[in-house]
Image: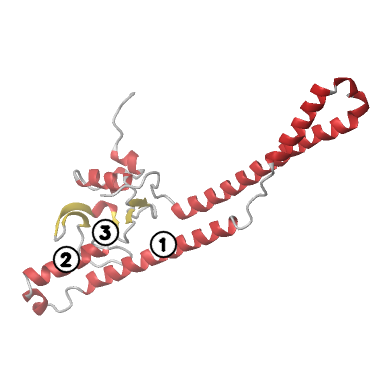
């Protein structure tokens, strides 16, 4: 039906069984559309991951939009430790939870000195993920600089202008002498053609360079929405 509202599973391109309930799924969609996270699919029987730009990784079905020590945030509903996933979306969420708990419930640490071990592991894991992406971005810039190190040779448009003006002047001033000066006129005409051919080659070379840079861009971008930089 024309104008029908798209379903969340279609927007996120995942099986409906992996979606968190409403209103959490709507916040996930908003976050993905802002380019702040991407959906990463795994094996057939494994839930997709919501992978945040700021390092956090949460299994999609477990994502919840709820109150935290830093206000309403997307977090994981699962407190159990699991390799490759985190409770919070970023390091700030971990730090705010640690600081908030120490402030509001200092006795909890006395009862369980290891209560923040997993949270700190999450923070370090997020930092390591961001470092890897930082390295990928550095490599991208290096590759772009290398691709642009020898830019296409730009032809001089003045040569065509000069040749065309000389032909024009000759034809205006000495039309009766065309036959006797045909070789010179042909040479000038070829100068115009050569200048145009040089321009065509230059454009083709710049096009190849643009395509190469675009390939590098798409590789480093991945599935992230970078069409427009948006912030929460």
Nearer the observer, 182 or 151: 182
Q: Earlier in the sequence, mark 2 or mark 3?
A: 3
Give the CA distance from mark 1 to mark 2: 25 Å
How far from the left and from the top, in percent, is residue 53?
Answer: 34, 56
Which residue in the structure is indicated by mark 3? 89
Instruction: State if disc 3 and disc 2 touch (CB < 8 Å).
Output: no
Mark 3 crowd level (few <14, some 14–19, many ≥20, 10 Å Cα): many
Quarter that holds the N terminus = top left
Left/right placement of residue 145 relative to residue 54 reads right
Percent x, y for residue 131? 39, 67
Q: Which residue is denoted by mark 1 in the rendering? A: 133
Give the structural element (helix, strand or loop) at label 3: loop
Numbered disc total: 3
Q: Quadrant of residue 202?
A: top right
Q: CA distance from mark 3 to mark 1?
A: 16 Å
Q: Residue 65, how many percent across, how many down?
A: 19, 51
Density class for disc 1 (Cα within 10 Å; few <14, some 14-19, many ≥20) is some
- Is 17 placed above or below 125 here? above
């Amino acid at each position: 039906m024309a104008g029908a509202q798209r379903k969340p599973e279609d927007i996120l391109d995942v099986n409906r069984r992996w979606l968190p309930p409403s209103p959490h799924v709507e916040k996930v969609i908003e976050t993905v559309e802002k380019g702040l996270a991407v959906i990463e699919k795994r094996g057939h029987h494994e839930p997709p991951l919501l992978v945040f730009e700021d390092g956090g990784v949460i299994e999609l079905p477990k994502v919840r939009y709820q109150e935290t020590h830093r206000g309403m945030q997307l977090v994981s509903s699962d407190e159990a430790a699991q390799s490759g996933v985190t409770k919070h979306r970023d390091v700030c969420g971990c730090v705010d939870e640690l600081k908030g708990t120490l402030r509001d419930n200092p006795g909890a640490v006395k009862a369980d000195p290891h209560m923040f071990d997993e949270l700190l592991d999450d923070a370090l894991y997020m930092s390591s993920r961001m470092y890897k992406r930082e390295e990928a971005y550095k490599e991208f810039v290096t590759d772009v600089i290398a691709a642009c190190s020898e830019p296409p040779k730009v032809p001089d448009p003045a040569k065509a202008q000069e040749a065309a003006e000389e032909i024009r002047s000759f034809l205006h001033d000495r039309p009766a002498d065309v036959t006797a000066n045909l070789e010179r006129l042909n040479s000038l005409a070829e100068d115009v053609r050569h200048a145009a051919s040089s321009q065509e080659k230059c454009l083709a070379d710049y096009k190849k360079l643009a395509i190469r840079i675009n390939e590098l861009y798409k590789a480093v971008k991945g599935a992230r929405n970078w069409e427009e930089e948006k912030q929460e």
